[in-house]
Image (tube, helix red, strand yellow):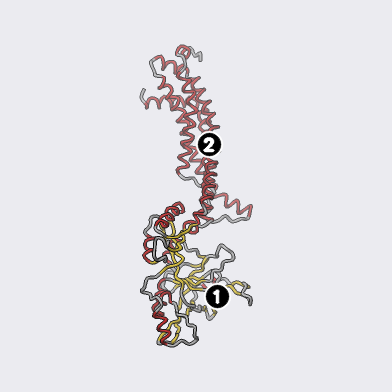
Amino acid sequence: MKFSDQLRFVRQNMKKNKTRLFMTVLATAMGCTFLIVLASVGFGLQQSMVDNIVGDRLVTAVDIYGKNPDMHKDTNVYAEDIAMFRELPNVKAVTYRNYIGQWLNPKVDGEEVGSDRTIQVDFEAEAEAGFALSAGRLPQQDNEAVIGYHIREQLDEQGAPSGYKDASEWLNKTMTLEAGYYKDGEKKTQPIEVVIVGVTEKPTKEWNRDKTVYVGVSMLEQLEALTGTQNGELPYFEVENPTAEQIEAALANMPKPTESRSYSDVQVIADHAANVKGIVETLRDKGFYNHSIADELKQVNLMFAIMKIGLIFVGTIAVLIASIGIFNTMTMAVTERAQDIGIMKAIGAHPSVIRRLFLLESAMIGCMGAILGTIVAYLISVAVNAGLPVIIKQFMEEEVPSGFLFSVIPPYLAALSCAIALGVAVLSGYRPALRATRIDVLSALRRDV
């Protein structure tokens, strides 16, 4: 008996009692749907809590603290190290900070800006890494800058915060920086104008105050060309009025822009949280001290893994309950088709063929239920993700974070659920199929089964 003939025979028999078949498939589909939807909650919460609530950059960033002195003579991080970081697999961006080595006395409309420092960053790399802003945009031109969230915070006589003005009111305004430099033994200043185009996001730690002015690479190059020193740093003198010789001697001993530059606050940003561990291990093997919050999230991920396994286990119980219906359906099918079985045996059908027919029927029931259940699970997942935020906002007056997903169904979860449903269906039909092979031919022909 060809396999195609077996399929046709099974389909014909399944059509004889469509109501019973429909109810059995429906029970299997409900079990599969319950399994997928239940497990999808674990996947959704993990993705939303780790990737969205904690913050993508916070999870994927690897902080570099220098080199291991046992493996490197110089523990500083240089340009060639930055270039090497960017060539590592699964690295999305590499960011760094260069602290301007002098007070630039920034002003906006004649008002002194409460900035505590000026930092040069690579805005192109920061854009790839996800530099967070509360207003505005990242600089696109050489003369544009970003200011810290608390830069307009006012202090009382004791230095405690006494008021706050919205920094976004300064967007598109011109900030004047006074760059100091020495020429002919005399200290001079030159104004440099930048346009404020962005405001950083409020720090998550409430005691942190971001009063920084962020400028680009071209601004640092302009400042260094003016001072002739790295990072625009000016020499410190213990005397109030240093002589020209003292100034020249101090400047001669300071690093020049053309010399090797060391970088601080270096971060290597992974393209996904799952790749952070590999990058961390690679950097440590190369002799770089580093740390990632992913190290701290190991227990969190383990907790979610256990929760997902538990949810899949509970969902599997629903599929097992549905298997009772398959067992009953196949048992009744064996009884109803006793005469057909007797005829097949009488004409020489092998018991393995008869067993295969019933296993094939139970497998088809499981497959139909799994496919239907998977489709319904995806529809429920979409409905839950779209409807729950509205319900929470309407009745609980709480705003769900943007991009938060309550339910996520990865392809392998759907495949695993279908495999479980199919496996349970085949196992449920095995006992009735085995019973069919043991039916006596004469008894079956007399319908005495």
Q: Secondary structure at mark 2?
A: helix
Q: Nearer the viewer, residue 347 or 316?
A: 316
**Residue position for label 2:** 316
Residue 170's spot in the image, x, y percent? 52, 73
Residue 296's spot in the image, x, y percent? 52, 54
Q: Nearer the viewer, residue 328 or 92?
A: 92
Q: Is residue 65 visible?
A: yes
Residue type at mark 1: give it. Answer: Gly
**Identity of the residue drawn at 48% across and 87% down:** 241
Distance (Cα) linking label 1 and label 2: 61 Å
Mark 1 vs 2: CB contact within 8 A: no
Q: Which residue, as the protein is rendered here, is positioned at the far front?
A: 70
Q: Is residue 219 visible?
A: no
**99 lies left or right of 393:** left
Q: Nearer the viewer, residue 288 or 132?
A: 288
Circle 1 packing at 10 Å, graded few (<14), some (14-19), many (20+), is some
Question: Which tag, 1 or 2, sits closer to the chain's start?
Answer: 1
192 versus 370 height, above or below: below
Q: Secondary structure at mark 1?
A: loop
Residue type at mark 2: give it. Answer: Thr
**Identity of the residue drawn at 39% across and 60% down:** 71
Q: Give residue 83's mark.
A: none
Residue 106's spot in the image, x, y percent? 50, 78
1 versus 36 height, above or below: above
Q: Quadrant of the N terminus?
A: top left
285 versus 8 height, above or below: below
Residue 142's spot in the image, x, y percent? 41, 73
**Residue position for label 1:** 114
